[in-house]
Image (tube, helix red, strand yellow):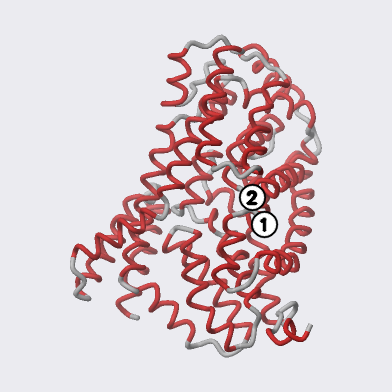
Amino acid sequence: MGLALIPIISLIIFLTLTITLFKQPPHIPLILATAVAAIIAAAMHYPWNEIQEGITKGIAIALAAVLILLVIGTMIGTWIISGVVPSMIFFGLKILSPKIFLVSTLLICSIISLGTGSSWSTAATAGVALIGIGKGLGIPSSMVAGAIISGVYFGDKMSPISDTTNLAPAVSGTDVFSHVRHMVYTTAPAYALSVLLYILLGTRASGGVLDTEKIELMISTIRTHFTVHPLLLLPPLFVIVMVVLKIPPLPALFSQTILGGILAIIVQSKSMSEVFQAAQSGYVSQTGVPFIDDLLTRGGLESMLRTVALIICALSFGGIMEKTGMLTVLVKSLLKKIKKTGSLIATTVASCIGMNAIAAEQYTAIVVTGRMFKNAFDKQGLHPKNLSRCLEDAGTLTSPLVPWSVCGAFMHATLGVSPLVYLPYAFLNLINPGITVLYGYTGITMTKKHEVTSS
């Protein structure tokens, strides 16, 4: 236990000093913590080839996510140069108002993500546009990103076609529909509270006053530099349809990169060279209006490389911790102190959050925590759907709140807002785990195995 804690304590110290004191990104502290974990592993007589195997296996978990991340970078670049994103912002500014914008953002992202089962696709399409609309309406990007995160992860955890929604019950030993129905008890009140908070926050953030000059400037600037047309809204709809039809995300998103490039040439009269540059390095806006140029200068494969590096650094640390059994030791030490249902639920939730911070990958958080706590739930006589609910309420929902996790790094790269900045406004992601713990201590909806059998 003492040896297993050394890398964790080192990680906390390195990250705290680097992020708060030196104001630097978390890449180097993660590498240093990985080095500490490797030294501890060597002290435990693990040969270097096994330590390296842990690193490579840890990284391999996220290779599919990395490929999607790179493709989304190219897609955002071609969607901006083609006028797709500017058109989404243009029409959004015409429809939405400051007072209802945050709650509308939550609802829009929830519906799309629920239908697609994909938080990433929703954030990369509707999310990118909503950030721009929010900026035009004078709503801080931190609040907008928080509402986006709440919405996309509502769908990620409640949609029967989501990967995590199927993974959690599979690990726990229940079926997906029992799992989804059981999550309604914790998610519904958390969602209702989130809606109320976004309504109050939206009124306060905008002051109820519409900055018509800024909106008109944004609309006229977009119209001047882009051809705006309702048909340019079709690509986001195509993404949703393809995901619903279960077309794999990589070819689905790459096809939209191609479509964006074709539209840029046909609609915006861009050259092939400009399209390739936007896909590779991102689109560079030169409207002469600083806040619009800042908003539209983004995308490209290269924009995602820093995020990919962060993911590799974080998963290297998690890979060593997993390979050497240090994660197992930490979880088993927690199990020894569990006496009642409340402490079991609280420990499971805390373990999911901790696993997201240590292993930096939500699938690892769900699988490792589920595997370790399954017997404990059995001994308490609890139905497996209680465990699967904990895994989603804590493992899925807190993954985008960790800056160096795969999900946190992706959302930062896609939305342009750091998880540390949007965290206070990701209400659903913060409230839901708390309700889960509250139910554990009060016994509300904590279904016993014999109750399901007898019914």
Q: Quadrant of the N terminus?
A: bottom left
Q: What is the C-alpha distance between the residues marked 2 and 1?
A: 7 Å
Q: Residue at x 50, y 56 (%)?
A: 402
Circle 2 sits on which residue?
117
| Residue 132, above or below 377 | above
Residue 29 figure quarter = bottom left
Q: Quadrant of the C terminus?
A: bottom right
Residue 113: image location, x then y, percent:
67, 47
Residue 363: image location, x then y, percent:
49, 60
Identify which residue, 75 or 455, lies in the foreground. Answer: 455
**Disc 1 element:** loop
Identify which residue, 180 or 81, lies in the foreground. Answer: 180
Q: Residue at x 78, y 58 (%)?
A: 192
Apparent side of residue 390 relative to residue 21 in the rendered image (left or right) = right
Asked if residue 169 shows in the view, the reply is yes
Residue 6: image location, x then y, percent:
32, 72
Q: Earlier in the sequence, mark 2 or mark 1?
A: 2
**Disc 2 element:** loop
Q: Residue at x 42, y 26 (%)?
A: 280
Residue 82: image location, x then y, percent:
58, 19
Asked if residue 425 shows in the view, the reply is no
* Amino acid type at mark 1: Pro
Verify CB contact (< 8 Å) between mark 2 and mark 1.
yes
Bin the neighbour count of mark 2 within 10 Å (Cα to Cα): few under 14, some 14-19, many 20 and up: many
Circle 1 sits on which residue?
160
Q: Residue at x 65, y 13 (%)?
A: 227
* Amino acid type at mark 2: Gly
Bin the neighbour count of mark 1 within 10 Å (Cα to Cα): few under 14, some 14-19, many 20 and up: some
| Residue 308, above or below 314 | above
